[in-house]
Image (cartoon, rainbow, N blue to C red):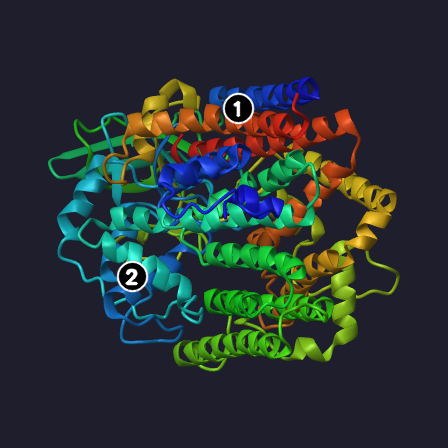
C-alpha cells in the first residue's frame, strides 16, 4: 500500500511541479508601477483636444523605468501620436509615442507604450499626456467604474475630472518571474518589517514549495505505517 | 489525557502531572504534527505574501481592530465624526498604493523606496483613533476583533505594518484549534481497533491543507474564529453522543455556539446545530448515570449561554449599526424575500441544478451556483479579494474530481449502510451543522438578491465553519475503499491539497509582485 501511495503522490506532485515551473518562466508585463489600472468593463473616453493635457501626480519613476503605458479610448484604430511629459524636482523628460501607430503599443491596438528617458533616481513625478498632432484630438481610456481607483485624480488642464486615466510604468518588454526572482521577493517584502526581506521570504517560499508536500507525504506514509505496521 | 488516548478512547497509562512540554509535544500523533507544521508554514506564507489589506474585506476588519484597540469601542456602520479608516491607515493605503489594488489584477502595490520614504516621513505624526466609521463591517459582533486587538496592542510600539503582521499571525492558534478539533472529530467517528489512522490523517489533511483555510488564516477576518469555534463544536457534539449528557458537555456546546454568535452573525447557524446535538445527547443518554437534575442544569446552562450571546451580539450590533442587522451578509437583507417562499425554493433549486420548466431565473446578474461556491471558492480556492485564481482547467478538474467523490460517497454509503445506520446519530449531527449553515446562507443570499442592489453575497469562505464535515466525509470515503485503492485515493487527496496550497501561494506572489 505504501508503494501505491508513493507512486500516486509522486505523480500528482510531479504534475504540480511542472505547472509551477511553467508559471515561473512564463513572461508577464514588466510592470514597475501602476498609477491607475485600465478600465475593467467599461471605458470612459477622455478627449484631449488641441493643447489639452491629462495629468496624474505621484507617479513613481525609477532609473529602471523605460515605458509609460496609457490606453486608447478611440473607437477607431486611426489615432494620433501622444506626447508624454514627466516632471519631478529638478528633472523632467518629454517623449513621443511610437511613430508607427499601427504597430503594437502605437495606440491603434488600444495601448500606447511611450518610451522615456528614465530619471537618475527614484522620483514621485507628475505625468502629463497630450496629443502630439496639431488638429487631432487624442482619446484616452479612463474609467469611472467604482472598482478602478487611483492614488491621485486625473486632471485635464488643471481641473479634476471624474474619469481616471489608466497609467502604468514598465521597465521594458515582458519577462518571467524567474528572470528577476530577487526583485520579486524584494517587492513582496517592501513594506513588511524586519526580519522580512528578500532572503527570508525566499527561504520561506522554498520551505513552502518543499516542506508542505514533504509533510503531506510523511503524514500519509506514517499513518499507513501506524495502521498496518508495514 | 493525550490526543492519542482521547482519540482512542482509552485511559492514559498513568497520571502525568509533571509531564513536560516536550512530553506533551511527543504525545501528538506524528501525522497530525506533520499536518500542523505544513499548515503553519502555509499560514505564515499567506500572511507575508498577501500584501497588506488585500484579504477579503480586510481593510474594514483591520480598521475595526484598530479603533477597538485605540479607543475601547468598535466603529459604527453609519456616519460619524470620524472616517472609515484612521488617518494612519489611510496614509499607509496611499503610500503602499493599496486602494487601486483591491480586487483588480492589473494593479500593483507600491514597492519603491521613494514611496516607503514618503510613508516613513508621515507615519509618526498620524492619528490612530479617528476611524470611528462609517465602517462596512461595524455591525459585526466584537469577539474576534477583541482577540485581534490583543495582538495589535502587544505590537503597538511598532510601525503599522508590524501591527498588521502581528494581527495576521495571531490567527495561527485558531488554525491549530481547527486542525486538532477536526482530528478529534474524525477520531470520534472511527472508534474502533485498530484505529483507522490513515483515514483520520487524510480527513484531517483535507482540512489542514485546504487552501482556503490556510489562506484565510493569513489575513485578518472573523471567519477564522468562526471556523475554529464551529470545528470545536462539531468535535464536542460528536463526543457528546459518546460521553452522554454531562453538564460540562452540554454547557460547553452552548458556550461554543455563544462564541460563534459573538464571532460573527453567521455564527447563528451554530445554534440549531448544537441544539440538535444536545437533544440527541439527552435522548441517547436517557439511561445514563448522570442525574436528571445535572442534565437539566447542563442543558439550561448551555441554552442560557446561547441566549446571553445572542442578546449581547444583538445589542452590540444595534448600538453600532442601528437595528438593521446582526451580520455583514444580512446587512442589505430586505424582508420581502421571505414573503416569496416559492421564489426561494426555485432559487435554491437553481443554485444546485439546472432550472426546470417555468422556473423564474433568480434576480441579479451573473451565474453563481454550486460550482462557483463549493468547487471554485471553497474546495479549490480563490485568493486575495477573489481575483487570484488558478487556471480554469484546474477548476474543471476539481469539478470532475468532486463529482466522482460524490459518486464514491453515495456508493460507500450504500455499501456500508449497516455501519451508517449504526451511526445515524453522528450522521445527524454532521448533517445538522451542514444544513443549518446552508439554510442560513441561502436565506441571507435570497434576501440580498431581493434587496435594492440584487447582490449575491455568498463566498466560499463562508463554508469554512463546516470544514470538519468535509474532513469527516473524506475520511469515511477513504475508510470504506479496499486496500490499494484506499491508499491511492487518500495519498492522491493529500498530494492534491498540498499542490493546490503551494500553487495558491505561488500565484499570489506572481499576481502581486512579478
Is B337 above or below relative to B405? below
Q: CA distance from mark 2 to mark 1?
A: 38 Å
State which mark lies toward you, 2 or 1: 2
Determine crowd level at label 1: few under 14, some 14-19, many 20+ residues with C-alpha closer than 10 A: some
Q: Nearer the viewer, residue B214 or B235?
A: B235
The local secondary structure at tag 1 comes to: helix
Q: Quadrant of the C terminus of chain B?
A: top left
Instruction: Point out residue B28 in the picture as x, y percentages from the top left corner.
Output: 49, 38
Q: Chain of mark 2?
A: B
What's the mark number on residue A20?
A: 1
Instruction: Point out residue B57 in the picture as x, y percentages from the top left corner.
Output: 44, 56
The local secondary structure at tag 2 comes to: helix
Asked if residue A100 shows in the view, the reply is: yes
Q: Nearer the viewer, residue B244 or A220?
A: B244
What's the mark number on residue B166?
A: none
Q: Are marks 2 and 1 in contact (CB under 8 Å)?
A: no
- Determine whether, in the image, residue B160 is placed left or right of residue B296: left
User: At x 36% / y 21%, what residue is drawn?
Assistant: A180
Q: Chain of mark 1?
A: A
- Determine whether, in the image, residue B106 is placed left or right of residue A1: left
Check chain identity for marks 2 and 1: say if they share one. no
Is B203 above or below relative to B56? above
Q: Which quadrant of the structure image shows residue A127?
A: top left
Give the labeled residue for mark 2: B66
Amino acid at each position: 500500500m505504501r508503494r501505491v501511495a508513493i507512486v500516486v503522490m509522486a505523480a500528482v506532485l510531479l504534475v504540480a511541479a511542472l505547472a509551477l515551473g511553467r508559471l515561473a518562466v512564463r513572461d508577464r508585463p514588466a510592470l514597475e508601477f501602476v498609477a491607475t489600472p485600465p478600465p475593467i468593463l467599461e471605458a470612459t473616453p477622455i478627449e484631449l483636444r488641441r493643447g489639452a493635457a491629462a495629468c496624474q501626480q505621484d507617479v513613481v519613476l525609477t532609473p529602471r523605468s523605460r515605458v509609460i503605458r496609457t490606453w486608447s479610448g478611440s473607437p477607431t484604430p486611426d489615432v494620433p501620436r501622444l506626447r508624454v511629459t514627466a516632471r519631478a524636482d529638478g528633472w523632467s523628460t518629454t517623449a513621443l509615442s511610437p511613430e508607427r501607430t499601427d504597430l503594437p503599443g502605437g495606440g491603434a491596438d488600444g495601448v500606447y507604450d511611450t518610451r522615456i528617458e528614465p530619471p537618475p533616481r527614484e522620483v514621485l513625478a507628475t505625468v502629463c499626456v497630450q496629443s502630439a498632432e496639431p488638429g487631432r484630438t487624442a482619446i484616452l481610456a479612463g474609467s469611472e467604474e467604482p472598482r478602478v481607483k487611483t492614488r491621485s485624480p486625473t486632471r485635464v488642464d488643471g481641473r479634476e475630472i471624474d474619469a481616471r486615466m489608466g497609467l502604468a510604468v514598465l521597465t521594458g518588454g515582458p519577462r518571467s518571474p524567474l528572470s528577476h526572482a530577487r526583485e520579486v521577493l524584494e517587492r513582496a517584502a517592501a513594506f513588511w518589517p524586519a526580519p522580512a526581506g528578500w532572503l527570508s521570504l525566499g527561504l520561506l517560499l522554498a520551505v513552502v514549495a518543499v516542506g508542505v508536500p514533504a509533510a503531506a507525504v510523511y503524514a500519509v506514509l506514517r499513518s499507513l505505517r501506524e495502521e498496518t505496521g508495514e | 489525557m493525550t490526543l492519542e488516548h482521547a482519540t482512542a478512547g482509552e485511559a492514559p497509562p498513568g497520571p502525568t502531572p509533571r509531564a513536560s512540554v516536550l512530553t506533551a509535544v511527543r504525545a501528538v500523533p506524528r501525522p497530525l504534527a506533520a499536518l500542523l507544521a505544513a499548515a503553519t508554514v502555509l499560514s505564515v506564507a499567506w500572511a507575508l505574501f498577501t500584501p497588506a489589506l488585500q484579504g477579503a474585506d480586510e481593510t474594514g476588519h483591520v480598521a475595526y481592530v484598530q479603533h477597538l484597540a485605540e479607543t475601547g469601542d468598535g466603529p459604527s456602520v453609519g456616519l460619524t465624526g470620524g472616517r472609515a479608516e484612521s488617518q494612519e491607515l489611510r496614509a499607509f493605503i496611499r503610500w503602499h498604493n493599496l486602494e487601486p489594488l483591491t480586487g483588480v489584477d492589473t494593479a500593483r502595490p507600491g514597492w519603491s523606496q521613494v514611496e516607503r520614504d514618503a510613508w516613513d516621513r508621515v507615519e509618526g505624526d498620524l492619528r490612530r483613533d479617528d476611524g470611528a466609521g462609517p465602517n462596512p463591517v461595524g455591525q459585526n459582533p466584537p469577539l474576534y476583533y477583541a482577540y485581534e486587538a490583543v495582538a495589535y496592542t502587544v505590537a503597538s510600539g511598532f510601525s503599522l505594518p508590524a501591527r498588521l503582521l502581528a494581527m495576521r499571525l495571531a490567527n495561527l492558534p485558531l488554525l491549530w484549534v481547527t486542525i486538532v478539533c477536526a482530528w478529534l472529530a474524525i477520531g470520534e467517528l472511527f472508534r474502533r481497533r485498530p484505529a483507522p489512522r490513515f483515514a483520520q490523517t487524510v480527513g484531517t489533511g483535507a482540512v489542514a491543507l485546504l487552501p482556503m483555510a490556510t489562506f484565510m488564516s493569513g489575513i485578518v477576518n472573523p471567519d477564522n474564529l468562526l471556523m475554529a469555534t464551529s470545528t470545536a463544536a462539531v468535535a464536542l457534539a460528536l463526543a457528546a453522543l459518546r460521553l452522554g449528557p454531562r453538564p460540562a458537555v452540554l454547557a460547553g456546546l452552548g458556550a461554543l455556539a455563544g462564541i460563534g454568535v459573538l464571532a460573527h452573525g453567521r455564527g447563528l447557524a451554530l445554534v440549531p446545530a448544537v441544539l440538535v446535538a444536545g437533544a440527541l445527547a439527552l435522548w441517547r443518554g436517557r439511561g445514563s448515570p448522570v442525574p436528571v437534575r445535572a442534565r437539566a442544569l447542563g442543558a439550561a446552562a448551555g441554552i442560557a449561554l446561547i441566549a446571553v450571546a445572542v442578546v449581547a451580539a444583538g445589542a452590540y450590533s444595534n448600538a453600532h449599526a442601528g437595528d438593521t442587522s446582526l451580520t455583514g451578509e444580512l446587512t442589505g437583507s430586505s424582508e420581502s424575500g421571505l414573503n416569496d417562499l416559492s421564489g426561494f425554493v426555485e432559487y435554491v433549486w437553481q443554485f444546485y441544478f439546472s432550472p426546470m420548466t417555468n422556473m423564474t431565473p433568480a434576480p441579479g446578474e451573473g451565474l453563481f451556483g454550486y460550482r462557483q461556491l463549493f468547487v471554485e471558492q471553497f474546495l479549490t480556492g480563490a485568493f486575495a479579494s477573489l481575483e487570484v485564481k488558478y487556471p480554469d482547467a484546474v477548476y474543471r478538474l476539481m469539478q470532475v474530481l468532486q463529482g466522482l467523490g460524490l459518486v464514491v460517497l453515495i456508493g460507500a454509503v450504500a455499501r456500508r449502510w449497516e455501519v451508517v445506520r449504526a451511526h445515524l446519530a453522528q450522521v445527524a449531527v454532521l448533517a445538522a451543522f451542514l444544513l443549518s449553515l446552508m439554510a442560513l446562507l441561502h436565506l441571507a443570499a435570497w434576501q440580498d438578491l431581493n434587496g435594492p442592489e440584487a447582490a449575491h453575497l455568498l463566498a466560499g469562505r463562508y463554508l469554512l465553519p463546516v470544514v470538519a464535515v468535509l474532513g469527516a466525509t473524506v475520511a469515511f470515503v477513504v475508510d470504506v475503499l479496499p486496500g490499494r485503492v484506499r491508499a491511492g485515493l487518500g495519498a492522491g487527496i493529500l498530494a492534491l491539497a498540498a499542490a493546490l496550497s503551494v500553487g495558491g501561494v505561488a500565484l499570489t506572489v506572481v499576481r502581486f509582485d512579478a
